[in-house]
Image (spheres, coloured by chain):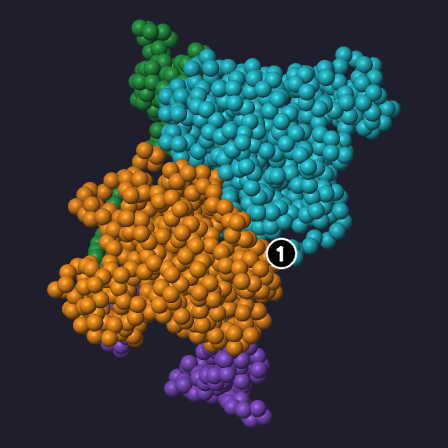
Chain colours: A orange, B cyan, C green, D purple
Amino acid sequence: MFGKVLIANRGEIALRVARACRELGVAVVAVYSTEDQDSAVVSYADEAVQIGPAAAKQSYLNIPAIIEAARMTGADAIHPGYGFLSEVADFAEVCRDNDITFIGPPAEVIATLGDKTTARQLMAGAGLPMLPGSLEPLNSVEEAQQVADDAGYPVIIKAATGGGGRGMGVVYERAAFADAYAKTRAGAQALFGDSRVYVERYLPAGRHVEIQVFADDFGNTIHLGERDCTVQRRHQKLLEESPAPRLPDGLAERMGDVAVNGAIAAGYRGAGTFEFLLAPDGQFYFMEVNTRIQVEHPVTEMVTGIDLVAEQLRVASGERLSIRQQDVVSTGAAIECRINAEDPERDFAPAPGLIEEFVPSGGPFVRVDTHGFAGYRMPASYDSLLAKLVVWAPTREQARHRMDRALAEFRISGPGVHTTIGFLRETIRHPAFAAAEHSTAIVEQMLDARAGQPEVDLPSAVA
Amino acid sequence: MFGKVLIANRGEIALRVARACRELGVAVVAVYSTEDQDSAVVSYADEAVQIGPAAAKQSYLNIPAIIEAARMTGADAIHPGYGFLSEVADFAEVCRDNDITFIGPPAEVIATLGDKTTARQLMAGAGLPMLPGSLEPLNSVEEAQQVADDAGYPVIIKAATGGGGRGMGVVYERAAFADAYAKTRAGAQALFGDSRVYVERYLPAGRHVEIQVFADDFGNTIHLGERDCTVQRRHQKLLEESPAPRLPDGLAERMGDVAVNGAIAAGYRGAGTFEFLLAPDGQFYFMEVNTRIQVEHPVTEMVTGIDLVAEQLRVASGERLSIRQQDVVSTGAAIECRINAEDPERDFAPAPGLIEEFVPSGGPFVRVDTHGFAGYRMPASYDSLLAKLVVWAPTREQARHRMDRALAEFRISGPGVHTTIGFLRETIRHPAFAAAEHSTAIVEQMLDARAGQPEVDLPSAVA
Amino acid sequence: MTDDKEAAQLNELLDHAFRNTAQLAADLADHPKAVHVRAGDVSVEVAWQAGQAPQAAPTAPTEAPAAPPPTKQEPADDPGVRYLTAPAVGVLYLAPEPGAAPFVGVGDTVTAGQQVAIIEAMKLMIPFEAEHAGRITKVLKGNGEAVEFGEKVFSCDEIDAA
Amino acid sequence: MTDDKEAAQLNELLDHAFRNTAQLAADLADHPKAVHVRAGDVSVEVAWQAGQAPQAAPTAPTEAPAAPPPTKQEPADDPGVRYLTAPAVGVLYLAPEPGAAPFVGVGDTVTAGQQVAIIEAMKLMIPFEAEHAGRITKVLKGNGEAVEFGEKVFSCDEIDAA
């Protein structure tokens, strides 16, 4: 195991990684921007290095500063968390060049899987089911139009290097294609400096189901079951659960098997996630691989009992996976809610600030991952995720009631501070979610239904 | 299920019961003394009734006030928590007379098992292993002396109606017996108004292992495995765990079986705990039955996934147990630490007050049950238990590291406020505890070793 | 904000918000705990310390008392008024028996220790005695109503204590 | 903020907000615990310490800048002293090359923008330029030492700014 690990991140995930290190007896180095001087992980860590000003580009994305911080503190390894540098192949390479272990897959694997085109080609070759469409970027509008016609409308045009729900366009009929194609290319160029796009069939009422995979240096590649991340707003996940409810018999196992095949084909190492789109007819399609720990990893931890971050550290330090495929047992149901400092009444605009009151939920089968505390001044410079509230119960229905209870008791307030707690409670109580009959459109449907309706105070007891 | 439940308790257990009710859709009535007006459960509950002044005798032990509170709010049932009225047979009877369901065993069962003499007779008859000694209170010093001689020294003299570690005396040699006998009788009379005592063999280096039992109205009586509560200070538990470490093969199952036999013999209903003393030779002996939910019930919940309080509510409302014996599976290891507002440097004197900073532990596999919050003025009138910190991990060793990490991150401070957090960390790291070679004497041994030694700051990383 | 006009508008909006906030604070008879003004993107919040005296006498301690008051928390008490509070949880009876005249009525003077009502708890009749002397000004609870411990049942004026 | 014009607008807005905040505090008879002003991207918060006497000169806004200071938190600074802080994480070199004379020494006067050291980060040589003019009074870090972003490297007296 490592002697000292530097955490190249902030917020709740920095604290999450620090906790895993502490439990393994590994010293922790935090890095932080001037904006994060008073953050929880800075006081939690054994050492902390200020690496730059608020702007992420000059701090959390500043590779030389982070490498120098690792050097001056003598860290053996760097955990990148999620976001920031976690999926930047160059960073993984620079780490290697500086004899620092990057806790994640090899740089080449990140590069291959981070490019949608090479990833799609590789995964199609490994036998993963793909949506009808192009495997390679398209060279002309004519070619693209042909692919779209063959795939059948609606189609989605996606930037080859895009992500986070940006650089995409949905086309519902042939006549609108050429125009949308040009626009998406221009947008991709502006956003990512790369105008390459590809086209595939678009599923409007799909579900988002993903498989957690893990691989070590000894040829062991396993999966830890699935997560359902169907509740999204503009491609941002709001709530995740495991197992995915109401899957046809054997489907989760089939998805797990193909994900493992894909991981083996990619030469994967460490923790990774295969994202799939699940159509209403039970067919599933490969979307992409995330080559890092996910925000929503706790739901997998709650149902399997496996500490994914500790496992990342073990595998990266050259140890074997501590579990075999046959040891992975999923028990009960877990749900995670992302509590963001956003104002649902103002189109989810960020609403951070000085948090005067902060009382996390507690009690049986409730877990809170947060960097928040009473007196924390949450900066506006970064992500609005403030806390992840996770519950477990023997059944999904019980977990839903538990989550409702836990959301109701979470108290966060301060001048100008708003959170998504109320909106998450509405989601948890929504009939479509309760029946697990929702699709990725659920949040939009909720917001549409809301518009024009008077606000309703939720009763504090479970209905 | 009930429509409305009144919680005749305070502190963390009142909140624990309220959470279970909320998840089951049951309305919650809190009752509180003037001292607890600003307590967490009062703001949590759907309704709250002030029942008396600070003194427990006039509030939390005030049967007419609680019954009237139930009547005026229309509560169907009363959950007594632990302590206070939870093991008062009269209270259970008054509830029944007023058509309010007492959430616990029938009054007669409480009465029989609450009296050490009748309980011992009943359990001996049901085949439970008893320590050598008297089954009935002794009538004279001569008779007592004879029993002690037969049992073999050391012996312990216990009040028939005692509890909580009071009203006991240990005698190490024959010559000291008569004197100790007289003293213990006088003490029992003063403390409990009942001078009856009995005598049994005393095991100085034993372990405290208990079995959680559960019974419904349909003849189903099961056990949920064992808890080890060996870490005690003056018979007050400080830390509990499940499973009990290093038990001889099959012992836990044997203890579970005899506890179920005992519960059936007593006509038990609801949740109960059979306490056993485990001798170094692997022999175990019945001590007593606690006819209520225990403080340490969360460790059982963490390893079995069963919500014991919800199960109490189900069974009391006339439903069947939701699990059968064969469904009970214990996975991994759980540890609970009781964080008390006490000052270990001043002989664990209560040290409550205004809690200015209160940041509970969080993250993976950590559970906190507490009524504390930043700004809470913890009254001096009641128990010093402020929070229960519970962790789970696949193995005891991992759970120990996790607990150390979680204890280190719990921040509680305020003028005059002290807690047992530091002492609990020392315990968790103690070599005897780490090796599970400790006995009920461990805390005394730690305190003895400490006396005269300079204080040592614990490093923040796991050694 | 992308141009001068917008900036000027915001400035104007700010001025407006401030004037309004100050005016609002001055106009309120009861001292507010917090003022929060928002207009579009502009928001102003002002918070006062809990319990601060309206005129903000510099020496007025703002600390909360060490122990909570014995009466159930209720909106602002008139400082001149005192209360007789229920000594137990139960049902209130204002008269010794059905049909009889009440123990006391508005305008009556009571002495400390004088019985003013009965609380019935679990069929026990508990005498409700005045904790202090006073002249009854109001009966706040009805005959047969349930009361909590410490709940205000009578308000009274202070008189020279017996 | 992407250009000078936008920055100027924001500054103006900020000035405005500060003036207004101070005015608001002065206008209020009672001393507030906190004032929080936000206008678009600009926000100003002023908080008074609990129990602070409302003497508080109405124009002196108590600290609570919108952004934390760029220097690493350290014990009480002498208010007269200013610092030149490291512009990057890395190894500090006080001279242009080994054996050469240092860029600056104690007693030297530096102008804003003048190079005073080098920070090496991942073999990149980053010039360390003075953020402001001053006379060097102390060199706080040694040649070859690792420094964090914002770490104080030189202390200096204020002189008339260039």
- Locate the C terminus of chain D and report the quarter of the image it occupies: bottom left
Q: Is residue B79 visible?
A: no
Residue in the image at 83% along x and 20% along y: B150
Residue C112 sits in which quadrant?
Answer: top left
Q: Residue B448 appears in which quarter of the rendering?
A: top right
Residue at the extreme left of the image, as rendered: A175
Quick one: SS at disc 1? loop
- Neighbour tally class for label 1: few under 14, some 14-19, many 20 plus, Cα within 10 Å: some
Residue highlighted by disc 1: B462
Q: Residue at x 47, y 52 (%)?
A: A224
Residue A451: % across, % down: 19, 47
Residue positioned 77% across, 22% down in the render: B132
State the quadrant of the N terminus of chain D.
bottom left
Name the amino acid, label 1.
Val
Q: Is residue C108 above or below residue B424?
A: above
Of the pair C73 and C56, the residue shown nearer to us: C73
Expressed as whole percent of the image width and height from the top left, the position of residue A159 reads 28, 68
Q: Nearer the viewer, residue D143 or C85?
A: D143
Q: How many marks?
A: 1
D28 in relation to A48, above or below: above
Nearest to the observer: residue B135 or residue A41: B135
Residue A221 position in % (x across, y down)? 50, 59
**Furthest-bottom residue in view?**
D100
Q: Where is B192 relative to D17, above or below?
A: above
Q: Position of residue B452 (x, y in %)?
A: 76, 49
